[in-house]
Amino acid sequence: MTATLITTGIEYVIGEMSFAGGWSVRFSSDNADLHHQLYLNGRLSDWTDTPGQRQFFIDEPDIAPTAVCVAAVEGKYRTTDLSEQLPVDDRNPSWVFRPQIPRPVSGRPDDTVEVLGNHAGGGEVSETPLASTQTWPAWVPRWQFGEDQFGKGGFGYDGTCAPGAGEGAFGAGMFGINADLIDLEADLPEEGSHQIVLRSRRADGQVADSDPMYIDANPLPDAAEGLSVTNYDHQQKQLTLQIY
C-alpha cells in the first residue's frame, strides 16, 4: 500500500517565536484521524505523536528564509519522508540548491566535495564553501577494486557493497555498476542570479571545478516588524497602513 500525503484541510499555519528559543508552529486541520508532518524547505523535520497534536517546536533556522509546510498522513507513515508528494513550490524552494553527485569510487577518504557561489553579487565565486561534505565518510562502505570481497559481486565483480539495481547513478561506477550519490544542500538567501560551481578537493590540496551554473533565487521577504496607521479618509472610508 502506497503512503498518501494530504495537504488539504490544513489551515492557519502560524509561526511564533518561543520564549525558550526557537519557534512554535501551530495549525488547524480537518484530518482528525491522521498524524501530521512538518516539512521545512521541502525536508521532513518533525511529526506528531498523536492525531490530535496541532503544534510543532523547531530550532531557530541557521539561515532565513524557511518555507513551512504541514501535511497529514497515516500514523504508520508519520516518520517517512514523503516530500516528493509535496506541491512543487514547497518541495523545491528556489533559494535552496540540492545537487546530487555520483560518488567516485576512485575518491579517497579525506577528499571533499564543495558548493561554491557568488552570493548573487556578480563576479567570481567565493572561496568559502556554501556547503561541503566528505567524498567517502567513514560510515559509507567502499567498494573500489581490491577493497571488496574479490569476485563475490555479480558477474565476478568486487561490488558487493555497490548500490543495487535501480539505485544511485546508473552505470557511473566501476565496470558499469551503479554509483552511490552524494547529497548536498546549499542555502541561497540573497535574491538574484547565483553563479554556482561544484568543486572536488583532494586531501593534498588539488582541486577540480565543474562548469559554472546559474540559479535564480527568489527567497521569501523578511517578516514584518510592525504595523501602524498613517491616514484615514473619512469620506472614502479608506484606511492607510504602514508595514515596516
Image: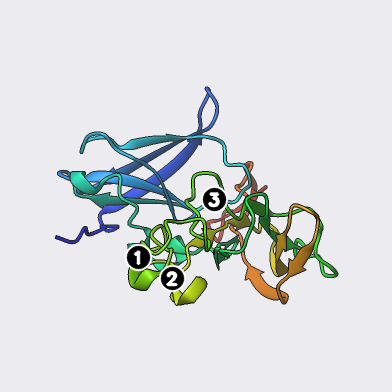
**Which is nearer the N-term, disc 2 or disc 3?**
3
Q: Nearer the viewer, mark 2 or mark 3?
A: 2
Q: Which amino acid, by three-letter code, is at mark 3?
A: Thr
Q: Which residue is mark 1?
A: 164
Q: CA distance from mark 2 to mark 1?
A: 7 Å
Quadrant of the snapshot with the N terminus: bottom left
Q: In the rendered image of this protein, does residue 21 appear above or below residue 159?
A: above
Q: Which residue is mark 3?
A: 66
Give percent across and percent down for residue 49.
Answer: 26, 34
What residue lies at 55% left-to-right and 27% top-to-bottom?
21
Q: Which residue is mark 2?
A: 178
Q: In the rendered image of this protein, does residue 59 appear above or below residue 165?
A: above
Give percent across and percent down for residue 74.
Answer: 19, 49
Asked whether the viewer can see residue 72, the reply is yes
Q: Which amino acid, by three-letter code, is at mark 1?
A: Gly
Taking the image as shown, residue 141 lies to the left or right of residue 230, namely left
Taking the image as shown, residue 244 lies to the left or right of residue 139, namely right
Taking the image as shown, residue 36 lies to the left or right of residue 243, namely left
What secondary structure is marked by label 3? loop
What secondary structure is marked by label 2? loop
Q: Nearer the viewer, mark 3 or mark 1?
A: 1
Q: Which amino acid, by three-letter code, is at mark 2?
A: Asn
Label 1 neighbour load within 10 Å: few <14, some 14-19, many 20+: some
Give percent across and percent down for residue 39.
Answer: 41, 50
Q: In the rendered image of this protein, does residue 25 appear above or below residue 81?
A: above
Label 1 near label 2: C-beta < 8 Å? yes
What residue lies at 80% left-to-right and 61% top-to-bottom?
206
Label 3 near label 2: C-beta < 8 Å? no
Label 3 neighbour load within 10 Å: few <14, some 14-19, many 20+: some
**Which is nearer the N-term, disc 2 or disc 1?**
1
